[in-house]
Image: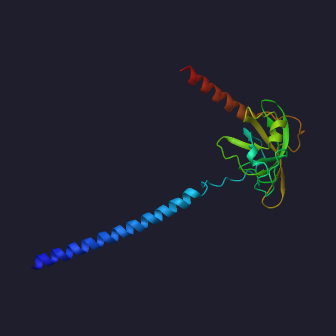
Amino acid sequence: MISSVKTTCYATILMLNCACGWAGTDDAGKEAESSAAVVHDSAPQTPKPTPDLTARKRVGKASFYAPQFSGKTMANGAPMDPQGDNAASRTLPLGTKAKVTNVETGKTAVVTIKDRGPYVDGRLVDLSPGTAAKIGLTPRKGITKVVVAPITVPLPNGKIKTGAAADEPLSQPDQVPVHDQKKDTQLAAADASAHAK
């Protein structure tokens, strides 16, 4: 008799624990679902890049704003002007003035960093369509290799740092720095070697 009471009590406790466990799991599942929905609905969180206050020249790919961004608010609060000198950089401080040289055409233009982006790996700067046209970047091509040479860089303390292009003629095209040319040559050789195999 005592044995059957113990078994009944044990079975009852086990059922209660399972029921509580299921309820807890169910609530946890609902919380996980609602958390997942919040995460899914928000933009992907990427680490904030470190501001580039070096004012030195950079080499990378340039693209330009698509037509649907015309008039959209940029990071500095102004509307994107497709014919303006506005440009986007992930790391140069807003307000930076820089000379952008298309390596292929040798054409240059002066831009002001007013927005953040581009958010595509390997791209250094997004240009307004007007600026892209000035340096010979066509919609058909889409992207091109550029040298971005800062003229002035606003610092967090309110001061202005003069950049690599501050004392150069703005119409003079920048050449790819020697260390980047070596890297390009090595990459080209590696590509040729891979295609030969």
Where residue 33 appears, as percent x and y from the top left, is 48, 61
Colour scheme in use: rainbow
Residue at the image point whose x is 72% and y is 53% from the top: 51
Q: In this view, does 89 lie above or below 101?
A: below
Q: Using the rendered view, name the quadrant where residue 158 is placed.
A: bottom right
| Image quadrant containing the N terminus | bottom left
The residue located at (55%, 56%) in the rendering is 40
Task: Answer yes or no: is residue 40 visible.
Answer: yes
Q: Of 180 and 63, which appears nearest the observer?
A: 63
Q: In which quarter of the image is residue 75?
A: bottom right
In this view, 188 is above or below 110: above
Q: As drawn, is 175 to the left or to the right of 189?
A: right
Give the side of residue 146 with respect to residue 17, left or right: right
Count of labels in the image: 0
In the image, 182 versus 109, the foreground residue is: 109
Q: Find residue 159 and report its horizontal and vertical position in percent.
A: 84, 58
Residue depicted at x 34% and y 72%: 20
Residue 165, percent from left and from top: 84, 42
Toward which corner of the image does residue 42 lie, by quadrant?
Answer: bottom right
Q: Can residue 59 be seen in this view?
A: no
Nearest the eye: 159 or 14: 14
Outermost residue to the left: 1
**Vertically, is 177 above or below 92?**
above
